[in-house]
Image (spheres, rainbow, N blue to C red):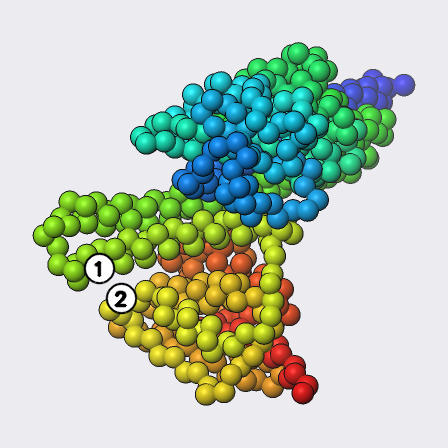
Amino acid sequence: MPTRDRLIPAVAGLAVVAVAVTVVSLLNSAVDGGTRALQDAKVAQVRTTAGAFNARVESSIGSLGGLGARPWELTTGSTNDAAALQAFAIDPEATSGFFLVDGSDTITSGVLLSEGSLGSTFDAPGWAAAKAALASAPAVVLPVAPSGVTTELPTYAFAVAIRGASPTSVRGAFIFEQALTTDSAFNQEIRGLGDDGATTATWRFLDSDDTVVASTLSTGLGSQIPDARLRSLEPGLHTIGDDLVVSADVPAVGWRVVFTQDEEEFAEPLAAPLQSVGLILVILMLTVGLTLTILLARRLRQSREQEQRLLELNRSQEEFISVVSHELRTPVSGVLGFLQTSLDHWDVMSNDDRHHAVRRAFANARRLQALTRDVLDTESIESGGYGYDRHPIDLADEISTAVDACDIGSAPAMTVNLPTEPVIVDADPDRIQQVLSNLLDNALKSSADTGQITVSLERAGAAARITVEDHGAGIDPDQMERIFDKFVRGRSGTVAGTGLGLYICRRIVTAHDGRIWAESRPGEATRFIVELPLSAPVAH
C-alpha cells in the first residue's frame, strides 16, 4: 500500500479525533458559560424579589404609622379603644388579630384575643428591642413567635408606636399579628415563585432569627431553618455542599430571601442536552457535529434571552422604585415648605396668604396621597383584594365633584359640558372619582399653559360616555394601548408620575363592565374616553 494511501486514513483519523476533542472542549466551555449566565440571572431574580418586597414593606410601615397618632386611651377594657379596633376587623375569616399594649406592656384591648390575654403582660420574643427601636421608627417588625396573643399558630407581628408627649416617647403600641400558614396570601405568593419541574428548588423568607416566615415547601413554617450553614448567610451567590445558594437582604425588616437548589439540577436544563449532543458528536464525528453546533447556539441563545428577560424585569422594578421615590419627594417637600412658611410668617401673613399656603400644602398632600394610593391599589388589584361598593350614582355629579377637587391653578382653562338630565350608572363612586382624578391630572400635566381642557358627558346608546380632552403633545399611534400598561409614564416618558394611573383606570373601568381608550396623534388633541353601561330604569 502506497505511503500516501496509508497517510490519508491516518490524517483523517487524526482530524476526526482533533475535531472530537475540540467539540468536547467547546461544549464544556459552553456549559460553564451558560451555567454562569443562569447563576447571574438567578442572583438578579433573588435580588429583585427581595428589593420589591422591601419596597412594599417600607410602604406598609409608612401607612401604618398613622395608627399611632389616634387618641388611644390604653386602659384595660376601654370601650372606646375596643370600638375603634373593631372598625379595622374587616376580614371575618382572619386567623389572627391585633391589639393594644400600654407603656407597661399590658394588653389593654384587642380583636381575636386569646382567652385570658386581656390585662396580661405582652412579652413576645424581641419585644424589648422592638420597643426601644420604636423611639426612632414609626413601626417595626417582631421576630417569629411560636404562638401569638390572637392565635395559637406561629406568628410575626408589626408593632406601631403610639407616641406620648414628645416625638420620641412611646406610651404604647398597636400590634398586628400575622399567622404563618401555608394558605396565607403571603405564603401563596412565595409558593408562586417555585418551579414545578425542579424538585429541589426552594425559596424561603427568613426573619432576623433565621426562622422561616414563608416558603415554597409545605413544611417548616415558624421553625428555624434546619441547615445551620444557611443561617446568617451573606448576600450573594454561594456553593454549600451540593447546593447552589443565593441570598439577598430585606433591610426594612431585617429579613433575608434564600434560594437553594441542587447544583446539578440547576444546570441540568442547559448541561444535560449539551452533554448528550456532545456524546453524539464524538460518535458521529463531523456529520453530526454541524447539527450539534446549531443546537448549542440555540441553547445558548435561549439562555441569553432568559437572562435578558430577568435583567429587564430587574431594571423595570428598580426604575419603578426610583420613580416612586422621586415622585414622593416632590409633594413631601411642597407640604413641608408651605407649612414651614406658614409657621415662620403666620403673624405677618394676610388671611389670603394663609389660605393660599394651606391650600398649596393641601394640594401637595393630596398628590402624595394619590401616589401612595396608586402603588397600594396596584398591589390590591393584582392580589384580588380590590373591593367595589356599587350602587346607582349620577355621573354628572361625580364629574362636577372631580372638577371642583382638581387644582388647575391659573391655566390651562377647563370647560365642562354636562347634560341637564341625570346620567345614572351602577358604580362605586370612590373608584369612579379615582378614574376621573387620574384622567384630569393627566390632562393638566400634558397641556401647555395656554391649552384648553374639555370634560364632557353624554349618552351613547346604552352607555354613558365621559370624554377628557387636552391639547398637549399628543400620543404616537403605536403607544395608544401601551400607555395603559404598568410603569408606562406619560407621553414619550416626559410626564411625571408613577406610570400606574392609566393602568389602574383600565382595571377599575373593566371591573364596572365598561371600557376606556385613547384617541390622539402627535401634535393633536388627545381624548381619553370612558364608557360605562347605563343603569336599567327602575320599574314603578
As rendered, which of 479 and 345 lies closer to the eye? 345
Three-letter code, disc 1: His
Give the label, 1 or 2, closer to the camera.
1
x, y percentage for residue 282? Answer: 81, 25
x, y percentage for residue 18? Answer: 74, 21
Q: Is residue 118 left or right of residue 454?
A: right
Q: Is residue 175 left or right of residue 327?
A: right
In space, the residues marked 1 and 2 are separated at their CA atoms by 11 Å
Residue drawn at x 64%, y 70% is 513
Indicate whether 296 appears above or below 511. Answer: above
x, y percentage for residue 94? Answer: 68, 41
As rendered, which of 141 and 32 lies closer to the eye? 141
Q: Locate the C terminus by quadrant.
A: bottom right
As rendered, which of 480 and 149 lies closer to the eye? 149
Residue drawn at x 64%, y 33% is 113
Residue at the disc numbered 2 = 409
Q: Residues within 10 Å of mark 2 (few under 14, many from 20)?
A: few
Q: Is residue 27 among the parts visible in the rendering?
A: no
Residue drawn at x 35%, y 52% is 365
Three-letter code, disc 2: Gly
Q: Locate the N terminus by quadrant.
A: top right
Disc on res. 356: 1
